Every structure is written in C-alpha cells, then in structure tokens.
Image (tube, helix red, strand yellow):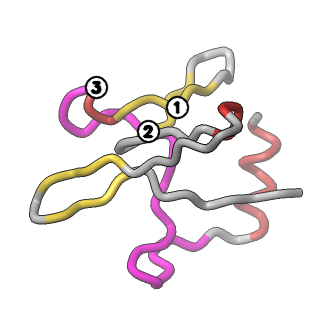
Amino acid sequence: MRCAFKCSAQLRNGQWNDVFKVPLDSSKTSKEGRLILTGDAKGEYQTRRYQEHGENPPDELVEVFRDGEIIKEYSYSEIRNNLRAQ
C-alpha cells in the first residue's frame, strides 16, 4: 500500500492560495486549491474544488489531524464496519 499527503492550498492573511506543482511528466501534475471529496449513490467519488459548491459544501473527508494533533480517532471495529458498508 502507498499513501501520500499533499498540500493543495494555503491560508495566508485570511486568503486561500492554491499550491501545486507542474512537473516535466504531465501525468504527475497535482490538484490545486481547497478540495472536497464528493460521493454519489453508486459509491463513486470525485475530487472537486471547494469554491464550486458554495459555503460549507458536503465533504466525505473527515478531518483527523490539525496542527500536529489528533482530533478524531476511530476504533478498529469502526474501521471494519466502514469497510463492510462499502
């Protein structure tokens, strides 16, 4: 399994700024801006820009870390139940 955490936006002086890279290999271009994850009834997900959905859009992602602190923990049984639900 592989996992990567990437920065796509930065809040500076009350303004959100896009963060992205433009590598020589265009298949590795990163997504930019504040992003949300939306899902449909078929269980298909898409990454979308936060701004496209107005204030407080529905987001499937749950914040679990903030400023180096764990703010949401899951038990092993909760994780297993979430996997079964899919």
The residue segment tinted magenta is 52-73
Mark 1, residues whose alpha carbon is within 10 Å: few (<14), some, or many (≥20)? few
Mark 2 highlights which residue? 36
Residue visible at 23% across and 60% down in the picture: 11
Which quadrant holds residue 85?
top right
Image side of residue 66 versus residue 29, left or right = left
Mark 2, residues whose alpha carbon is within 10 Å: few (<14), some, or many (≥20)? some
Residue visible at 61% across and 44% down in the picture: 23
Instruction: Find out whether the residues at labels 2 and 3 contact each other: C-beta distance under 8 Å.
Output: yes
Q: Nearer the viewer, residue 20 or 65?
A: 20
Amino acid found under the numbered disc labelled 3? His
Mark 1 highlights which residue? 47
Magenta span includes 68: yes
Mark 3 highlights which residue? 53
- Identify the residue at the far top of this view: 42
Distance of label 1 from label 3 (alpha carbons): 12 Å
Distance of label 2 from label 3 (alpha carbons): 9 Å
Instruction: Find out whether the residues at labels 2 and 1 contact each other: C-beta distance under 8 Å.
Output: yes
Q: Which structural element holds mark 1?
A: strand
- Total marks in image: 3
